[in-house]
Each structure stands twice: as C-alpha cells, then as structure tokens.
Amino acid sequence: MKVDLFIPCFVDQMSPQVGMAVATVLERLGHRPVFRPAQTCCGQPSFNAGYLDEARAVASRAVELFADAEVVVGPSGSCVAMMRVFYPQLLAGTVHEAAALDLAARTFEFGQFLVDRLGVDDVGAVFPHRVSYHDGCHGLRELHIREAPRRLLAAVRGLELVECDERESCCGFGGLFSVKYPMISTAMAEVKGGALARTGCDYVVSADPSCQLQLDGWLSRHGHSIRTIHLAEVLARTA
C-alpha cells in the first residue's frame, strides 16, 4: 500500500526521528511511505485560537493536497483529530465539504492505522524496558484510541507495560492552553507526571509529540531519569 505521511510541525521541527521511525515500520511491513513536501501545519493553532478563516484556508489546502491519497497516516493524535474530526466541521457548507469528509475517512493516527486498518499487532520490535503509556487527549477523546497502542506494545519483545493511576488524565499541554494558562498547565503536568513517575518505568511512551515535550520537561525538571519516547520509535527498534 502507498501510505501518505502527514508530518506534524512538532515532528518536522523538533523530533524528525519520529517521522523516520514511522517510515521504517511501514517499510518493514511491506508498504511504501511517501512524503509530500508541499504539506504544511494542519491548522490547529489558529483553529484553537478562534481564527477560523485562517484555519479554514489551511484545511482547504490540505484536502486539495491529499485528494488522491489512498491513506494518510500521522504520528500525532492531535493533528489527526484535527483532520478527521474538525476539518469536516470547519469546511461544512463550503466547496470543500465533501472532500473534507472523504479525507477524514482516509486519515489515521499511526498506531490506529497499524491495528485497525492493517490488522497488525506485532511489527517485530524489540525494546527491553519497563514503560508506561500516556494517552494524549485528542487521541483518547476525539479518536477514541485506547487499546491499539497497548496491543502494539504488548507484542514488543522484552517490553514490560505498566499502567499509571492517572491513565486518562491530561498532561496539561493543550497547545495554546499551556501558553495562556501556564500555572494550570503546570499543575496538570504535576498530576500526570507524578503518576507516571510512581510506576517506576524507564520510559513514558506517547503517540503525541506535544505531550512528550510537556512530560519530558516536567520529569527532567523534577530530577527523574524517566524519559519520553514516541510509540513509533519503540516499534522501529529491532535490537
């Protein structure tokens, strides 16, 4: 299958290894990942800030760009939720309404794509560490992804998955939320970060790079040796 990659801004600018890991896993499974350099931000920052006309322009461009894609896969529940859930709302009543609905049906978060679209749990990964999984809010609440990443992690050789006692709590990032309400954001990070630290894990695995940034910052500032890693990076490891 030809798989169009949607690479979010956080991955493009701060963690390009995540995009490479996605491509590695897809190629290992026999698929052909492709990247369209003309892609841009999904438009979520302007959408969340209430600049709907600006967000609509970005969304319109995206549905045109990926009009002929068989499937679109992204390593971010947040950005994929923007495309699957909010593009159809944003472009309702416009000339792009039908295209937005069509793109939404062909767009998947990476782990969701592997499990729900390809029917794959075991990708041949090896990662001999104790990990805890953090559910990003958009993946959990908008895309309803709960079990897919855990099924993938359960099949990784040497990996021990331990759940924290705040499994569905937000990390407090929320994009512009962390900028506009830093004290609340930090308090939320303390709740989730503390719960993850109590598991005694080596790594916190997430499917959202922005959540990784928030949690990694809190954990490092509080002297914890735990680090964050994207789900795709775990699944790309074979030794």
Image (cartoon, rainbow, N blue to C red):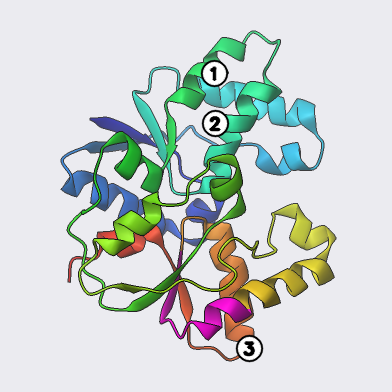
Quadrant of the image for the C terminus? bottom left
Location of residue 43 (image quadrant): top right
- Say above or below: 163 vs 202: above
Per the rendering, the mark at residue 101 is: 1
- Say above or below: 30 vs 132: above
**Residue 41 in view, yes or no:** no
Answer with mark 1 or mark 3, whichever residue precedes in sequence: 1
Q: Measured from the top left, where is residue 13 in percent x and y?
A: 53, 56
**Residue 94 in view, yes or no:** yes
Q: CB under 8 Å between callouts 1 and 3? A: no
Answer with mark 2 or mark 1, whichever residue precedes in sequence: 2
Helix or strand or loop: what does disc 2 sit on? Answer: helix
Question: Which class describes the residues within 10 Å of circle 2: few (<14), some (14-19), or many (20+)?
Answer: many
Q: Which residue is mark 2?
A: 84
Q: Which residues are magenta?
A: 194-205
Q: Which residue is mark 3?
A: 222
- Say above or below: 115 vs 93: below
- Say above or below: 231 vs 81: below
Disc 3 marks a residue whose amino acid type is His
Q: Measured from the top left, where is residue 133 in percent x and y?
A: 46, 66
Residue drawn where x is 58% and y is 67% of the image: 213
Q: What is the spatial separation of the Cα atoms under label 2 and label 3, in whole angstroms? A: 36 Å
